[in-house]
Image (cartoon, rainbow, N blue to C red):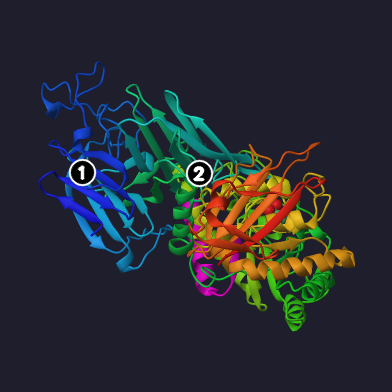
Amino acid sequence: MSIIFDKNHHTFTLHTKNSSYQMQIDPFGFLIHLYYGRRTEGCMDYLLTYADRGFSGNPYDAGLDRTYSMDVLPQEFPHTGVGDYRNVACTVVNADQSRCCDVRYTGHVIRKGKYSLDRLPAVYADESEAETLEIMLKDAVSEVEITLLYGVLPEADIITRSVLVKNEGKDKIYLEKVLSACLDFVGGNFDLITFQGRHCMDRMYQRHPLAHGTMKIGSRRGTSSHQYNPMLILADHETTEDFGSCYSMTFMYSGSFQAEVEKDQFNQTRALIGLQQEGFRYPLEPGETFTAPEVILSFSAQGLNRLSQNLHVCIRNHVCRRKYKNAVRPILVNSWEGAYFDFNGETIYQLAVHAKELGIDMVVMDDGWFGDRDDDFSGLGDWFVNEKKLGESLGHLIERINALGVKFGIWIEPEGINEDSRLYKEHPDWALSIPGRKPIRARSQLVLDFSRKEVVDAIFDMICKVLDQGNIEYVKWDMNRSLDSVFSRATKEQGAVAYNYVLGLYDFLERLTERYPNILIEGCSGGGGRFDAGMLYYTPQIWCSDNTDALDRIKIQYGTSFGYPISAVGSHVSAVPNHQTGRSTTLQVRSVVAMAGTFGYELDLGALPEEAKDIIRNQIAQYRKYAKLINYGVYYRLTNPFEEEAAAWEFVSEDGSEALLNVVMQDIHGNMTVDYVRLRGLIPGRMYREEESGRLYPADALMETGIPIPVEYKAYRAYQIHFIAE
Ligand code: GLA
């Protein structure tokens, strides 16, 4: 049993292999949070303290007890209107316009298996792998019922949370704020780790001690965004990669979000994550239920590496689905950086010829094959193959490529629309825009109103007609702007549009993956602008960044690795000088970096000298040899590339019998000092043979003092060293 209800103490305890989570129904029916941390037994209500706190309100039913205040007590789901002045998870506007939701415990259900969510992605598990707890809370006046959902995956050290809000009253109400999870800590001296960035510099790691006040991140862009990833980590000040306690909250949603972490007047910490509140005003008619997207929680007492490993396993085994879930992905070459919009069928065919010659599995025809699309000013929305441009039909092109023994993939951007398109001429009202105002353009395009079913249906039909034209085995689903002018012609309730848009997106993706279960879909939004657990439920990999510069990618992929597995990270070797930075690095550096991902190429293969082709053939053989270890082994960050010159990471097989060390030297100086990189995860007491030299190394010394990185006189060196246990 991983979920235990203790009748004597009125506590719910959720146990995973290495963590425990506890809450208590107090005498007034409030659901109090007691504990989350390393696994323990017993009742932790000794942690609650009571004192008369000035200016902190007391619920009426506490009578004259001035020591009882929701402004001080740790809670599971804090809401507006009960005297808690901290950030809350939920604000309900009642029919009389009052903002109050005083929900108290009414019952609970414990059952086998993991709950799922209506029209939203959620962690899934077999009956034997998970348990579900539902706790019902109700407001006696408005009759709003809140159900808190908890999923416990003991082996994975994962707890999930979600919330259902049901209007059981007689009048329409509005939800102004619904965040899916709250973690209240009675103390905590935490650092907050978040992942900020911008287009082409996605998910930059940042770590700051919390100060009094609220540290807030989020997205108002309609997508989860390049700017802040929808996840956060709270770590003790002394926590490192390998030691100390840390907690993560991952929001499984691909639209606007917010996360608030507050250190309050009594040095208590509250962390919340969920839907973006700005612009959100969701109507609930009597009898209707609102479902908040899921949050994935994990705890590690063994540092950040273990926390990330928990999340990697969870996303690989309990978020990603279908054929490619645990399969090594094809090595592909994408046409974008090699040809941009300037190609025809023969260009793509020749790319496939070179791919075949080098041992690449698949060629992907990126943007530019449909409508009138020779640049990014026109054509989006017109999902008809431009046979004139290709010089042949899509079916014919695919047949020619398949005949070479090469697979074929294609790029789409179903949510986008150019004003200069047939679709826009026919349906200008399908684009999100405010009547009477000019829309905000970005990349010269608008966004289709995916909150409307007829729009989703129409685009779905057009895309299916394309996908039915031949043996398409891969789709890159792109989304190249942030939403603005979020206004739908189909509703009066504009506060629901952004959320319903994401439901429309998920509906499309669900139907697409059902109809084409064998197609591998790679998510993309100008690279990693929608790199989140919600998308990974449909697309088991996501193009990590539009920046393919190997040195920048080290930092981008480092940040990404905190929350997401290597198998999800789309990463390619591209040309030098790099198109985003102008920097030149060797093919060895570019390939070692791209191998910390799904691995592929994005350059004009035909333009490569013979010497480079030989190197690429070797790289491909190398990747195939390590692909399982890389994608499904245990991943360790060994250094912080923001602080150290040696960027190093390692893949270790689950049983510790082999390890692949990867190092890139990011800088060079005169009279170089020597870097020693310390390995992790080896079996203590064992000897490891370095495959290339045959030299033997003791595991403990490799983990204690490390291995010296050779001193060589050139910038940007990369090493890949394979160790096998004797
Ligand atoms: C986005 C993607 C790129 C490429 C272009 C095509 O920027 O991230 O990889 O597909 O769109 O327009």
Residue at point 75%, 52% (across, down) = 376
Q: Residue at the top extreme?
A: 54
Q: Residues within 10 Å of mark 1 (few under 14, many from 20)?
A: many
Q: Can residue 383 be seen in this view?
A: no
Residue type indicated by callout 1 = Lys
Residue at point 31%, 52% (across, down) = 289
In which quadrant is the C terminus drawn? bottom right
Q: For ligand 1, which image quadrant applies?
A: bottom right
Mark identifier at residue 241: 2
Q: Is residue 721 above or below residue 141?
A: below
Residue located beneath label 1 in the image: 138
Q: Can residue 322 be seen in this view?
A: yes
- Residue 687 coordinates in the image, percent (x, y): 55, 61
Q: Residue at the bottom extreme?
A: 403
In which quadrant is the N terminus drawn? bottom left
**N-term mark: 2 or 1:** 1
Q: In this view, does 360 lie to the left or right of 556?
A: right
